Image (cartoon, rainbow, N blue to C red):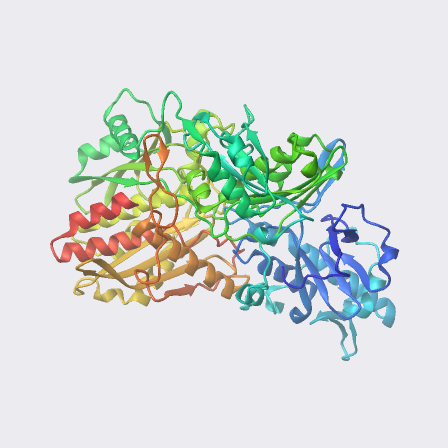
């Protein structure tokens, strides 16, 4: 992370903090995990002023960021929330990642930083609720120190740009006040927060704190991290879900120069998905990556599929269609308003559509990796890019039995997450190797586990494939009177301790639009069997059903010869608040209508009827945010040319508009790339994709030159943004293709192909 402080070549800053107490800095060595020494050993250069904060004598302000940053810009936004309330000089702020904050408490771990998770767009809403108080406490302490120094009441002082300032213009720097502030007791009640009219950082654009390091190649990612001289480990994993080892030439692998040993890895039985190694494997331990990979190749490992091999996607699709047609199959009814059957009997017109979506991998730029240093019976240090440090702790504690104070979880910058790093299987593999009996020459050396791209694609926690069948009843006024959606998929919550009747929660959202807009509405979910591991993928319960519902709305508009924008706005109806049981509710239909109109205006939707190009639009409500995409495509001899893409988002108060814009653009590009190219396929019981040649992330050519973004100004509390740009991008593209091919009387083949890809 930028601004790393090196007290000497072999010393580093170690943070430990609590949301209710001041930040403590200890000095440790690379060779050992020491307990923090007395603060006096640090001299007078540092002073503690509040949670997450340290102020140096030269005026630099170190802000610790609790949530992992895997490219979302979390470090920048969280630090600016604290710096805003502190009234800090942003040019003097240095951002430091905090590892897992944990201390013992009544025999149970006490997570001293509060929630530490980067996923589901949760970081910013949670930080807005509690991290502002950290900065406000720091400002209060500094102003109290200034009041003592000047002999004035503290309420006659204000903070501004790193100074305490009096009404007559006298000023004292935070650096001069820090030592005094550190001696002042915190107030019995939380200090007041700033009013929004005084914001100087929140709402203003700021570059990522790691941008310079990233573009110059000096930013250290998890893959770059190490401890001492680690043993490198790569694994040959069983490619068959539920399969077993058939044979391997271990001796041939050990004869490769640089290979130390080959260790069998057996998944722990009875552990929830994501908390243990996924598959039986052979770990090749070597002095370097090349030797480890050469040893793995020399193994010539062969594997056997289980008794019931994983079916091909087409077989699961057929199971879904059969379930839809079989009245004896009882689905999980997620929502049931009114009477959809009665609405269908009264309908002036009824329409039906079926949509297919494939398995999708995360394919993060940085593949999973983990470093472990284990001192038996003493301590363990784990370095891993993760979106959930607590998940990593749970794995390490279970496998070692260590007390909280013996476990050090360090979380460096990660190269993409998208939900993949919410799992800790790669940490469990590293721990298993660290705990295994090894040759004397490497017994006490750290272990570094590395995944290759083929490992990553073959053993991901995939976004589940899905089949949707939607029925709609239209009344004589061409309005939707009834809506019945059925979805079939393998639940991403299966094997994680979730009750059977709640497995649908990873697949769809009960109150997602058009629920609440249609008087007779029913949503049913059908489970499909699969042995493939499944997990979170960029807001999956919003992404997967939104493609089907937003595409179907366009088909309904087409059937009644209505403008898709007008059809959506009529469906939203008058401004009102719709009950919403998920995070972020209620849904404000006026805010949704606003992002739709803004996206349409930006694309010049008035051309919709007369343009030979296809214009498509779609919208979504995601974790409290409102988003709409508008897309223009032109059919070509080779397929389509994406001419323009507009993304409009209302996420409440934008902490860092520049970072939000980057998130929306990146998420949109990822969604378009996925829609155009990507699918994980299963054949003969195993995943077929092995790299970007057969899982082709889109290159520059098929994607738009830019994603035009509009960020709605709002004073509402902020929602998260990391996944907001995903759900409505693909259906907007599909709807643009729908329109283009409808105009040219060749709609169905291309549309169906795109729907199948999605």
Which one is nearer the viewer's eye here, 735 or 438? 438
Q: Does 626 sit above or below residue 33?
A: below
> Residue at 43% of width from left, 26% of height from top?
243
Confirm whether residue 516 shows in the render. Answer: no
Q: Residue 213, position in %: x, y? A: 58, 65
* Location of residue 331 by image quarter: top left
Residue 460 as seen in the image, left or right of residue 440: left
Q: Residue 468, position in %: x, y? A: 29, 37
Q: How many marks?
A: 0
Confirm whether residue 251 shows in the render. Answer: yes
Q: Residue 191, position in %: x, y? A: 73, 57
* Location of residue 706 by image quarter: bottom left
> Residue at 75% of width from left, 60% of height from top?
9
Quadrant including the N terminus: bottom right
Which one is nearer the viewer's eye here, 111 or 405? 405
Quadrant including the C terminus: top left
Q: Residue 394, position in %: x, y? A: 63, 35
Which one is nearer the viewer's eye here, 507 or 12? 12
Which one is nearer the viewer's eye here, 289 or 174? 289
Residue 209 as seen in the image, left or right of residue 622: right
In this view, the residue farthest toward the left is: 745
């Amino acid at each position: 992370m930028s601004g790393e402080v090196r007290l000497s070549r072999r010393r580093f800053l170690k943070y430990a903090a609590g949301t209710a107490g001041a930040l403590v800095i200890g000095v440790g060595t690379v060779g050992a995990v020491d307990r923090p020494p007395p603060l006096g050993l640090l001299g007078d250069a540092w002073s503690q002023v509040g949670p997450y904060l340290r102020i140096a004598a030269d005026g630099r302000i170190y802000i610790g960021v609790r949530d992992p940053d895997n490219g979302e810009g979390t470090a920048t936004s969280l630090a600016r929330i604290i710096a805003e309330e502190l009234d800090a000089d942003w040019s003097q702020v240095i951002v430091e990642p905090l590892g897992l904050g944990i201390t013992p408490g009544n025999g149970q771990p006490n997570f001293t930083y509060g929630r530490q998770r980067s996923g589901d767009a949760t970081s910013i809403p949670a930080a807005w609720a509690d991290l502002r108080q950290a900065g406000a406490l720091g400002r209060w302490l500094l102003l109290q120190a200034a009041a003592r120094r000047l002999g004035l009441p503290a309420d006659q002082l204000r903070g501004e740009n790193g100074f305490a300032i009096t009404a007559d213009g006298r000023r004292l720097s935070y650096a001069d006040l820090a030592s005094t502030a550190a001696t002042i007791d915190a107030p019995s009640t939380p200090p007041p927060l700033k009013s929004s009219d005084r914001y100087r950082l929140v709402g203003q654009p700021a570059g990522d704190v790691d941008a310079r390091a990233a573009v110059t190649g000096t930013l250290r990612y998890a893959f770059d991290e190490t401890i001492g001289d680690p043993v490198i480990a790569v694994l040959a994993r069983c490619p068959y879900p539920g399969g077993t080892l058939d044979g391997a030439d271990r001796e041939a692998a050990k004869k490769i120069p640089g290979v130390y040993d080959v260790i069998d890895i057996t998944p722990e039985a009875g552990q929830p998905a994501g908390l243990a190694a996924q598959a039986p494997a052979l770990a090749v331990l070597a002095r370097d990556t090349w030797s480890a990979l050469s040893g793995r190749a020399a193994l010539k490992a062969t594997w056997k599929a289980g008794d019931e091999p994983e079916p091909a996607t087409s077989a699961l699709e057929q199971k879904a269609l059969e379930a839809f047609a079989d009245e004896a199959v009882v689905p999980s009814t997620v929502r049931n308003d009114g009477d959809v059957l009665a609405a269908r009997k009264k309908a002036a017109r009824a329409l039906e559509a079926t949509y297919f979506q494939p398995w999708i991998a995360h394919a993060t730029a940085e593949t999973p990796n983990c470093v472990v240093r284990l001192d038996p019976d003493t301590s363990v240090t784990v370095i891993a890019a993760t979106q959930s440090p607590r998940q990593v702790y749970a794995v390490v504690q279970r496998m070692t039995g260590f007390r909280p104070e013996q476990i050090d979880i360090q979380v460096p910058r990660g190269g993409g997450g998208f939900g993949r790093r919410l799992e800790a299987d790669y940490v469990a593999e590293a721990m298993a190797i660290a705990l295994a009996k090894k040759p004397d020459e490497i017994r006490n050396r750290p272990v570094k586990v590395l995944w290759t791209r083929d490992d990553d694609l073959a053993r991901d926690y995939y976004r589940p494939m899905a089949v949707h069948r939607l029925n709609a009843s239209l009344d004589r006024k061409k309005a939707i009177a009834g809506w019945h959606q059925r979805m079939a998929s393998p639940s991403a919550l299966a094997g994680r301790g979730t009750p059977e009747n709640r497995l649908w929660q990873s697949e769809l959202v009960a109150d997602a639009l058009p629920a609440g807009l249609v008087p007779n509405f029913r949503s049913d979910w059908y489970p499909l069997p699969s042995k493939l591991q499944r997990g979170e993928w960029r807001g999956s319960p919003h992404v997967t059903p939104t493609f089907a519902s937003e595409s179907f709305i366009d088909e309904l508009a087409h059937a009644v010869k209505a403008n898709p924008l007008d059809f959506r706005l009529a469906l939203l109806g008058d401004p009102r608040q719709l009950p919403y049981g998920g995070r972020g509710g209620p849904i404000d239909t006026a805010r949704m209508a606003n992002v739709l109109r803004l996206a349409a205006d930006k694309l010049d939707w008035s051309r919709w009827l007369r343009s030979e190009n296809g214009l498509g639009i779609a919208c979504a409500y995601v974790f409290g945010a409102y988003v709409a995409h508008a897309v223009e495509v032109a059919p070509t001899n080779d397929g389509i040319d994406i001419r323009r893409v507009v993304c409009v988002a209302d996420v409440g108060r934008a902490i860092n508009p520049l970072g939000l814009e980057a998130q929306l653009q990146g998420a949109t590009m990822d969604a378009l790339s996925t829609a155009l190219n990507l699918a994980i396929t299963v054949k003969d019981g195993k995943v077929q994709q092995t790299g970007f040649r057969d899982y082709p992330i889109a290159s520059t050519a098929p994607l738009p030159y830019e994603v035009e973004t509009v960020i709605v100004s709002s004073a509402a509390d902020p929602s998260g943004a990391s996944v907001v740009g995903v759900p409505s991008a693909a259906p907007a593209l599909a709807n643009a293709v729908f329109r283009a091919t409808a105009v040219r009387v060749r709609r169905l083949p291309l549309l169906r192909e795109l729907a199948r890809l999605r």
